[in-house]
Image: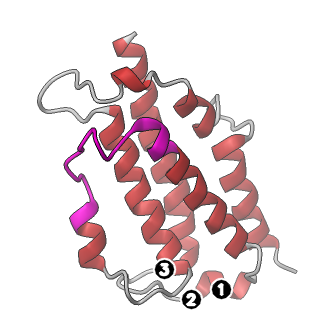
Amino acid sequence: MNKEINSIIRNLENTLDGEPWFGRSIYALMREVDAAKASTKPNEQSHSMIELLYHMITWSQFALKRIEKDQVNDMAAFEKLDWRDIDPQIHGWEDGLSEFIATHQEIIAILQTKTDEFLQEKVDYRNYNFRFLLNGLIQHNIYHVGQIAYLKKLLE
């Protein structure tokens, strides 16, 4: 039985595109963002919605590469991308959202091949296991989509 891994997959799917307890799903909230406003900052100290999206992409891709046991993409590569400078010629809202969705689809597909024992394995470059990483990814996504939802409402 793989009750725990299946529970994590269901929780991830529910927060991303289901009916989570906190309200609209992450994808639903992100699909409502006006791409023309995605780069707007309410002040100089704040992040824009697009900066938040690409930050979320970085750490979802980190999780994916750790799950894949990919040694090529090391911590320095992810730390360099974290809070990257957003170039409007490269970083569009729709492209970023598609990348975010595709990354999570890959994560879920791989997790469906894993057992509960996988959750106890240590994550490369970290002092925690995959249970902590995957629950943290879910929490990270919820935290930042909340910021995106707030900015979206603020900029309407």
Query: What is the C-alpha distance between the residues marked 3 and 1?
Result: 12 Å
What's the residue at 68%, 65% (across, down)?
108
Q: Secondary structure at mark 3?
A: helix
Q: Please report the bounds of the magenta region as a residue range.
A: 80-97
Q: Residue drawn 27% across and 58% down?
A: 82
Give amino acid for label 2: Glu
Q: Is 86 contained in the magenta span? A: yes
Q: Is residue 141 left or right of residue 13?
A: left
Spatial CA span between label 3 and label 2: 11 Å
Which residue ends up furthest to the left in the rendered image?
44
In the image, 86 versus 19, the foreground residue is 86
Query: Residue placed at 69% from the left, 73% from the top?
Result: 111
Find residue 116 and report its horizontal and vertical position in percent: 73, 81
Q: Residues within 10 Å of mark 2 (few under 14, many from 20)?
A: few
User: How many residues crowd mark 1 within 10 Å: few (<14), some (14–19), many (20+)?
Assistant: some
- Where is residue 112? Give x, y as percent: 76, 73
State the residue at coordinates (76%, 63%). Answer: 7
Q: Is residue 45 left or right of residue 59?
A: left
Residue 74 is inside the magenta segment: no
Instruction: Give the residue at mark 2.
Output: 121
Residue 124 % position (x, y): 42, 87
Residue marked by disc 3: 66
Quadrant in which the C terminus is drawn = top left
Disc 2 vs disc 1: Cβ atoms closer than 8 Å? yes
Kindly identify which residue carries mark 1. Answer: 118
Q: Nearer the viewer, residue 107 or 143?
A: 107
Give the mark toward the camera: 3 or 2.
3
Outermost residue to the right: 1
